[in-house]
Amino acid sequence: MKLNKYILLIGALGLALQSYSQEGTIKRAAKDYDKFSYVKTSEVLLTVANEGYKSVDLFQKLGNSFYFNNKMEEASKWYGELMMLNEDVDLEYYYRYAQTLKSIKNYSEADKWMQKFASIKSDDLRAKSFTSKLDYLSSIENVSENFAVENMDINTEYSDFGSNQYKNKLVFSSSRELTEKLYKWNEQPYLELFTATRQNDGSYANVEKFDDVINTKYHESTASFLPNDRIVYFTRNNYYRKRLKRDGTGINRLQLYRAIFQKNGSWGGVKSVHFNSINYSVAHPSVNAKGDKLYFASDMPGTQGKSDIYVVGINEDGTLGVPKNLGMIINTEDQETFPYINSKGDLYYSSNGLNGLGGLDIYMIRDFEEKFSSNQPLTVENVGKPINSSKDDFGYYENLGTKEGFFTSNRDGGKGDDDIYSFKIPDCLQNIDGFVFDKKTKDLITGATVRLYEESDKEVSSMIIGVDGKYMFSDLRCEKEYLVRVEKENYSTDEDRIVTTDIRNQTVSLDLEIELETIPLTKGTNLREAINLNPIYFDLDKFNIRIDAEIELQKIIAILKQYPNIKIYIKSHTDSRATKAYNDILSSKRNVSIIKYLVNIGGIDTNRLTGKGYGERQLSNKCANDVKCLEEEHQQNRRSDFIIVEN
């Protein structure tokens, strides 16, 4: 993609040419350079450079001439020559050099120049993006997917880009219409809007001009429609009522226009939107699913980079409100452009100011509209391969109903300058995994059966976990509720519900804990701990059995009856309040009360029961006499233990 042919950086390159040897040749090139005729400029400057002349100014302009025509390998060569001069240059050339190196996949060298750029210009958002994720390549690789992207049959050797759908047609921009008048930037015909009709097999064919009222002899591109298909917004040069308008420096900007579908089946009523200006560009509209918001790119006042993403409200009559910049989370000092908002409110856009694979990469923010309106945090994600490449990737569009996706790229292997690629949106599938632990010991459990149920309680899958204690269920539908249940003999059953997200190929983790139900009846086992017995609490200064304690003692009775050979030793304790002598007596009385309850109420043989009161000698916490504690903490010490002494 010729970066600024479609984006917005018009007029930003008007750098003064300095005089030097070969002055006549350079001056002739300067005239074309200032008019952005970069194809012709590069030829002239290349001749001068090949004759051995070297200067900062020459290498900057020569590098720019290739950079802005997206000939990154050549641009990289001359920016490299610029850096070898070891002279002071604008830091922006560090950044551009890094971008050209990425474009030819020399990422290690690109990162070195980004480090230099970031070390000097640390407050730059592009620098912050780079330093915040130095492992960006592996991060992009992690989100990349393996699905086919197809170079569409409608592409030509010229520029074809920026798709959208209108009824059963694909609307796109192209410079295929051969005319005598060529655009000086790249010596190609001017852009116009075209349509291709969807065929029964899902392909697109029968390319036609979109509309003769909307198309003019200058650039038209990137159309977006209201949900009722009655109003279209599109990009055009500042050409209105057969007049081409320029700013004070002679530059013609891009603007947004609105057209209304007429009763005769054509488009009409073309109007310029109210915030267009001869002094800045406005371009690349995208209407949301509700038809009440329009997103676009612009370098209007308030833009922090070369172009930013904006949003504006749409009134009922199709007129627009006051634009709002989407802010620094999205926009950088470089170019953010080609916004697209899908039917779920996810925002896609292209940027060359964030960590990417090279050139423009496509990024997304999930559930953007909801999060932006409610001031929730926004997370920008690189969509990864195969949509992104080391070249320019932009103009993303998707139809979630038909599962069709489109984007534009000038990657290697294409038919022309920029080509439109199509792909089938993969089914949104996820994985659920996790570990199964012993609730008490936190050890991994092996041999348990884990079952997966849909929300209707229909079993979908099951597996027996191995020695690693891990389970996994794959290829589950996104945004759906599942129930995971784990079972194992002699253990309690545990289950939990989980809802998958809307992120393809994501793995959602859910750990489960199960509790051993078989009691280890070995010598020295404390039954209070083995069966998670609630403490046998006593009231202050009391030794009678409380009602809540009776429930716990009944559990002891049940075990003693089930295993008649068990003998237990009962230890009763008090808190630290009162004297030690008093507490010794009180704990002994409590011990006797427990034994009497087990014998008289439970029918347990007294020969199986022994015990002793320990007073405050074995406190379970810090609450000694000289420590101030809450009542709940003191109560923890008024307890009893049941130790197996014979089995």
Image: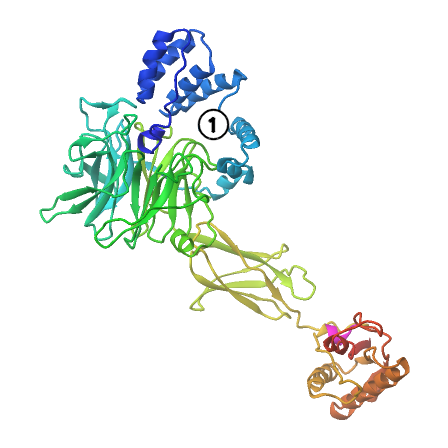
Residue 473, given in percent of the width and then of the height, sits at 50, 56
Left or right placement of residue 634 versus residue 203 in this view: right
Residue 472 visible to an observer of this rendering:
no
Q: Does 522 sit above or below residue 42?
A: below
Q: Does 26 sit above or below residue 424?
A: above
Residue nearest the observer in this picture, 111 or 629: 629
Residue nearest the observer in this picture, 288 or 516: 288
Q: Quadrant of the N terminus?
A: top left
**Highlighted range, magenta:** 525-529
Q: Quadrant of the C terminus?
A: bottom right
Q: Which residue corresponds to the image point at 35% horizontal and 38% vertical from the top-left?
A: 300
Residue 596, given in percent of the width and then of the height, sits at 80, 90
Q: Does 428 sit above or below residue 513?
A: above
- Give the farthest residue toward the right: 581
Q: Does 252 sit above or below residue 146?
A: above
Left or right placement of residue 448 versus residue 283 in this view: right
Residue 120 visible to an observer of this rendering:
yes
Which residue is label 1 attached to? 92
- Give the farthest residue toward the bottom: 600
Figure coloring = rainbow
Left or right placement of residue 417 versus residue 434 in this view: left
User: Within the image, what quadrant is residue 23 found in?
Assistant: top left
Left or right placement of residue 169 versus residue 429 in this view: left
Q: Which residue corresponds to the image point at 64% horizontal and 69% vertical from the top-left?
A: 515
Residue nearest the observer in this picture, 565 or 227: 227
Residue 458, given in percent of the width and then of the height, sits at 44, 67
